[in-house]
Image (spheres, coloured by chain):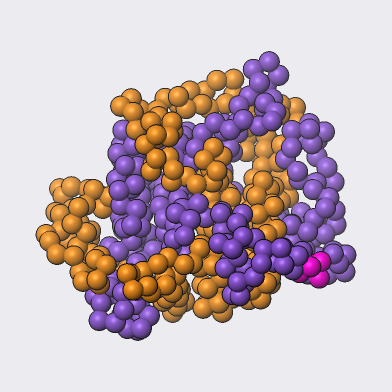
Chain colours: A orange, B purple
């Protein structure tokens, strides 16, 4: 029984290149998927359809064009917004659907302006579409909602993505979706889904800060010795 | 702004809506359900919505329920009334929400798909997840080391110039590798545009994007929208560098004519 695949703990990275474009040298660890799962990789490569190859090619070109070539090396130029625009241009998409949280509605307005200015046809859908009641449909208890006794609509990513597909969107851009709802959206979408922003309620939508800034309290909380404790108080989960 | 009724109703965008029948504010929620205007997709695309609701079956419904619980768990609650504290006080960062979601949904095996540039962060997050009792497998985007020529990338289109031995990123290979490990849930860290589309398409388990890569703002992708009117961010808006006020004005004029 080989050890489990754990690329995040690999320190040779023979699969990638250094900044001069040469492959890194070294001995790959015993659990490297290139050694243990070569057949899976081979089968995956055979799964590429024509559209997938087009997407992969466009993604590679967009990545390469995201940098300016300075004498001292590569300078990042393209933001994620610009990358999505370049990607949609390369793929020839005309109509973009924005699937976003109600709370990111203002951002979606600006994003709509950006896409219109770049010559796309844009439609946005907010997450509460069709106003299905949380309690009734998902079986939440009254005290588990934010306003007991009220009509809290549930976030409805499947309706969101299906109405966008019905309106003829060729690319879905999700923006500011909560944890889990973007997973549902990605799972049920027929059109390709790309993520522009993810919601992080406490770190100003920059979730990576919790892992990169050692002075951040959330970093300290996450990296302490004791695991997080999940408790259920008065109808709400809390993590201490 | 043109009257929404004049257009095809399925073409009306939620950002142009003024009715806000679905506004999830505490005071609105208290009043009960509000009637949506005719151009709202709830009415204009009612059949599509009805059809979509049938897709919430056992596993999906369970996941949606866990996600709704986690969404509600992220706000402070007034212990006396049981309603959310106003103004809303938020509690948990996304890194923690994902752990909470996996615990509530009782998932054991998590897959982590990350960009090689975020390897150190991925290592840290793997350790955090393992410390919380999950069985984690991780896979980086260059796995397979397939040369870029395989997807017809020419020498000029390569990142480090011609004759470099670059390998391609592949969302598809990552998804297939995690499928072969039968993960309960996948976490994406910093996948590029396009690769996440491929990953979502082929992954069998639910895939949660955790961090998004942004080469300019270092992961804070939303800055690309917030800073679009200053000289640093208006590259998103137009290819010509213009003054911010002009840009803002033209933006609103554009919306008027839209």
| Residue at 34% in and 53% down | B118
Please tell me which residue lies in front, A143 or B94: B94
Q: Does B71 sit left or right of B151 as displayed?
A: right
Quarter-of-image position of residue A134: top right
Q: Is residue B128 visible?
A: yes
Please tell me which residue lies in front, A69 or B149: A69
Residue A162 percent across, percent down from the top left: 64, 60
Q: Is residue A4 above or below residue B72?
A: below
Residue A23 percent across, percent down from the top left: 20, 69
| Residue at 58% in and 33% down | B90
Q: Does B18 sit left or right of B161 as displayed?
A: right
| Residue at 31% in and 58% down | B116
Q: Is residue B126 magenta?
A: no
Q: Magenta span: helix, strand or loop, mainly?
A: helix
| Residue at 31% in and 74% down | B160
Q: Is residue A31 above or below residue A202?
A: below
Q: Is residue A194 above or below residue B77?
A: below
User: Start and end of the magenta stretch?
Assistant: B253-257
Q: Does A92 sit left or right of A111 as displayed?
A: left
Count of marks overlaid on the render: 0
Residue B188 percent across, percent down from the top left: 42, 52
Q: Is residue B255 magenta?
A: yes
Q: Residue furthest left?
A: A27
Please tell me which residue lies in front, A49 or A216: A216
Q: Residue furthest top?
A: B80
Q: Is residue B204 visible?
A: no
């Amino acid at each position: 029984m080989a050890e489990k695949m754990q690329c995040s703990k690999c320190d040779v990275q023979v699969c990638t290149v250094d900044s001069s474009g040469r492959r890194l040298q070294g001995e790959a660890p015993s659990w490297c998927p290139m050694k243990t799962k070569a057949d899976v990789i081979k089968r995956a490569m055979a799964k590429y359809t024509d559209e997938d190859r087009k997407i992969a090619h466009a993604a590679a070109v967009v990545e390469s064009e995201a940098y300016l070539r300075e004498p001292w090396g590569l300078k990042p130029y393209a933001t994620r917004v610009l990358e999505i625009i370049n990607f949609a241009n390369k793929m020839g998409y005309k109509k973009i659907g924005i699937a976003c949280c109600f709370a990111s509605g203002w951002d979606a307005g600006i994003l709509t302006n950006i896409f219109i200015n770049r010559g796309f046809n844009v439609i946005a859908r907010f997450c509460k579409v069709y106003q299905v009641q949380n309690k009734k449909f998902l079986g939440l208890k009254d005290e588990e909602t934010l306003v007991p006794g009220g009509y809290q609509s549930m976030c409805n990513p499947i309706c969101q993505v299906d109405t966008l597909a019905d309106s003829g969107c060729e690319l879905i851009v999700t923006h500011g979706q909560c944890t889990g709802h973007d997973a549902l959206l990605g799972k049920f979408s027929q059109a390709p889904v790309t993520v522009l922003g993810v919601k992080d309620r406490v770190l100003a939508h920059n979730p990576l800060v919790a892992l990169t800034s050692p002075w951040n309290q959330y970093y300290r909380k996450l990296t302490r010795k004791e695991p997080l404790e999940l408790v259920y108080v008065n109808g709400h989960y809390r993590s201490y | 702004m043109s009257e929404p009724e004049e257009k095809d109703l399925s073409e009306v965008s939620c950002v142009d809506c003024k009715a806000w029948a679905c506004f999830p504010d505490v005071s609105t929620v208290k009043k009960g359900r509000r009637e949506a205007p005719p151009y709202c997709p709830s009415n204009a695309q009612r059949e599509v919505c009805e059809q979509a609701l049938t897709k919430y079956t056992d596993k999906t419904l369970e996941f949606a329920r866990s996600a709704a619980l986690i969404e509600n768990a992220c706000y402070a609650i007034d212990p006396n009334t049981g309603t959310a504290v106003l103004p809303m006080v938020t509690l948990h960062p996304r890194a923690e929400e994902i752990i909470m979601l996996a615990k509530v949904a009782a998932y054991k095996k998590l897959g982590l798909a990350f960009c090689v540039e975020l390897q150190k962060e991925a290592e840290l997050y793997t350790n955090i997840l393992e410390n919380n009792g999950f069985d984690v497998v991780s896979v980086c985007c260059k796995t397979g080391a397939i040369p870029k020529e395989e997807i017809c990338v020419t020498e000029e289109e390569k990142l480090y110039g011609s004759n470099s031995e670059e390998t391609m990123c592949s969302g598809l290979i990552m998804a297939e590798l995690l499928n072969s490990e039968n993960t309960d849930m996948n976490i994406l860290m910093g996948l590029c545009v396009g690769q996440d589309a491929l990953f979502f398409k082929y992954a069998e388990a639910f895939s949660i994007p955790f961090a998004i890569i942004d080469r300019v703002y270092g992961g804070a992708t939303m800055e690309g929208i917030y800073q679009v009117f200053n000289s640093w961010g208006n590259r998103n808006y137009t290819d010509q560098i213009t003054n911010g006020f002009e840009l803002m004005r033209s933006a609103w004029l554009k919306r008027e004519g839209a």
